[in-house]
């Protein structure tokens, strides 16, 4: 294989990236369409709309850990195809129920829950696929491309959904969402089935066949269910990455809670300009995916995490210095570089996790991270809402920007700065038997 072709010509890689991109775009479209259905067609109360918006964090807390175990016990190709097809069914329910006269706010909430479960399952599964498609040495490029495509989906999905709804009507977004999920399922069918089955792991094949006592079965089942927590406890570096990520997400949630308030009431941005500003800052994520692989080559697969958090992310400290007019550039620069650093950091974290965690534990490790982050993000959003009843917007912006940057300080230790970053085999692959330090 020539260097020009790279990992993207390997079997299944293009289908994986294309299917994930189309699926993520569909998810963004449904994120706009469902609240609009509740508000405009069903004239739902503010409480119901807020419930639909909050369902993501609640559902994630309930389903994340079981999803991780499911991913580690099921063929991942079959799982991705199934989740996209189920997602297509859920997305098509709303137009069907409206046509038949049975649509209620309860159905909208049920669909929102179903789509969130699907999205969580697809996300956790997606994070386990790349090691089966390319050698370890090429995972940075593929994960960077995936992270970049996700940023494009986040930026473009909302725009596509809004455009379809404005031109063809409210249900056009959900119908296009259904089509997107079906196309994603078809593309995922092209993934190599034989390499995406975690049940072929030697760790599972060598499990004892003697039937243990009931108490031991319960203890073993609990240990299996909570396997992701065990990995984080055993691997000091993974644990610090998780703490850093959680800290960053807590404060970025705080910043997101006041984002529109800050733009409109403090920076005096007109309503039409808010979308432009947010879209422009999100482009930083696309740039991050492009520069990911070169940065990893320069700084290494672990030290790049420190670089992104403490160097590339430095402009996030400009947020509280923004002011109306030309000072808006401080706000744009801060979020632009934050989006860029987040994509590079997330790609590095996922790649490192894929290299050091045994294949049959990847799902649970990813699900554990999402569960802990959902818990922290939900608490942060609630505390921010309470805080805004007594303090002004600017102090929240100041605290959140400093908190986001300081989250990188967790990585300033020997586990991230030493030369021997990741032990690999002679062929460039990771020695997974030595992964848990």
Image (cartoon, helix red, strand yellow):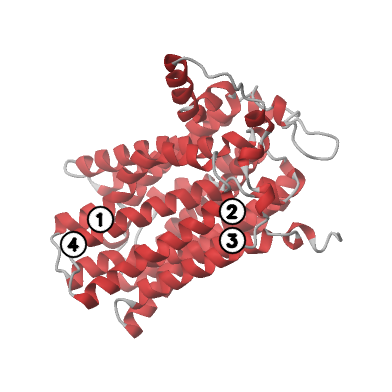
Q: Which residue carries the number 4 mark?
A: 105
What x and y, as percent, mark residue 223? 48, 23
Chain-order first, disc 2 or disc 3 = 2
| Distance between the alpha carbons at the discs numbered 2 and 4 | 34 Å
Most foreground residue, 20 or 157: 20
C-alpha span from label 2 to label 3: 7 Å
Q: Looking at the image, is mark 1 or mark 2 nearer the viewer?
A: 2
Q: Are marks 2 and 4 in contact (CB under 8 Å)?
A: no
Report if residue 16 is visible in the image: yes
CA gap between label 3 and label 4 equals 33 Å
Element type where label 1 sits in the image: helix
Q: Disc 3 and disc 1: Cα gap in Å?
A: 29 Å
Q: Which one is in front in this view, the residue at disc 3 or the one at disc 1?
A: 3
* In contact (CB < 8 Å): disc 3 and disc 4: no
Return the residue at label 2.
77
Q: Quadrant of residue 311?
A: top right
How far from the left and from the top, in percent, is residue 293?
70, 52
Residue 405 seen in this snapshot: no
- In the image, which is nearer the foreground, mark 4 or mark 1? 4
Q: Residues within 10 Å of mark 2 (few under 14, many from 20)?
A: many
Q: How many marks?
A: 4
């Amino acid at each position: 294989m020539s260097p020009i072709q790279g990992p993207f010509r390997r079997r299944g890689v293009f289908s994986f990236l294309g299917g994930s991109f189309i699926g993520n775009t569909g998810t963004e479209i449904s994120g706009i369409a469902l609240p609009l259905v509740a508000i405009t067609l069903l004239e739902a109360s503010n409480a119901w709309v807020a419930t639909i918006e909050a369902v993501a964090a609640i559902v994630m807390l309930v389903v994340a850990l079981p999803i991780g175990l499911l991913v580690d016990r099921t063929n991942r190709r079959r799982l991705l195809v199934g989740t996209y097809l189920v997602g297509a069914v859920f997305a098509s329910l709303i137009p069907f129920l409206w046509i038949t006269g049975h649509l209620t706010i309860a159905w909208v909430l049920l669909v929102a829950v179903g789509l969130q479960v699907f999205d969580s399952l697809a996300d956790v599964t997606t994070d386990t696929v790349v090691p089966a498609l390319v050698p370890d040495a090429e995972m940075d490029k593929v994960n960077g491309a995936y992270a970049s495509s996700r940023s494009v989906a986040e930026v473009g999905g909302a725009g596509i959904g809004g455009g379809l709804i404005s031109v063809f009507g409210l249900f056009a977004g959900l119908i296009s969402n259904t089509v997107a999920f079906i196309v994603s399922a078809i593309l995922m069918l092209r993934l190599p089935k034989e390499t995406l089955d975690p049940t072929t792991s030697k760790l599972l094949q060598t499990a004892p066949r003697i039937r243990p006592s009931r108490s031991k079965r319960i203890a073993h089942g609990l240990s299996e269910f909570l396997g992701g927590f065990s990995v984080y406890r055993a691997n000091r570096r993974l644990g610090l990455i998780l703490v850093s990520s959680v800290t960053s997400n807590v404060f970025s949630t705080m910043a997101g809670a006041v984002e529109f308030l800050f733009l409109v009431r403090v920076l005096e941005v007109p309503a039409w300009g808010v979308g432009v500003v947010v879209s422009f800052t999100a482009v930083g994520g696309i740039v991050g995916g492009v520069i990911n692989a070169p940065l990893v080559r320069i700084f290494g697969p672990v030290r790049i995490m420190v670089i992104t958090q403490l160097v590339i992310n430095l402009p996030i400290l400009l947020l509280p210095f923004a002011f109306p007019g030309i000072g808006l550039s401080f706000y744009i620069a801060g979020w632009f570089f934050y989006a860029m650093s987040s994509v590079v950091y997330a790609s590095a974290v996922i790649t490192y996790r894929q290299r050091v965690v045994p294949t049959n534990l990847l799902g649970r490790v990813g699900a554990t991270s999402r569960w802990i982050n959902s818990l922290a993000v939900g608490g942060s959003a609630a505390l921010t809402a309470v805080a805004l009843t007594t303090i002004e917007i600017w102090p929240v912006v100041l605290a959140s920007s400093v908190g986001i940057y300081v989250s990188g300080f967790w990585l300033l230790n020997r586990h991230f700065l030493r030369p021997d970053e990741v032990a690999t085999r002679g062929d460039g692959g990771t020695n997974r038997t030595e992964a848990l330090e």
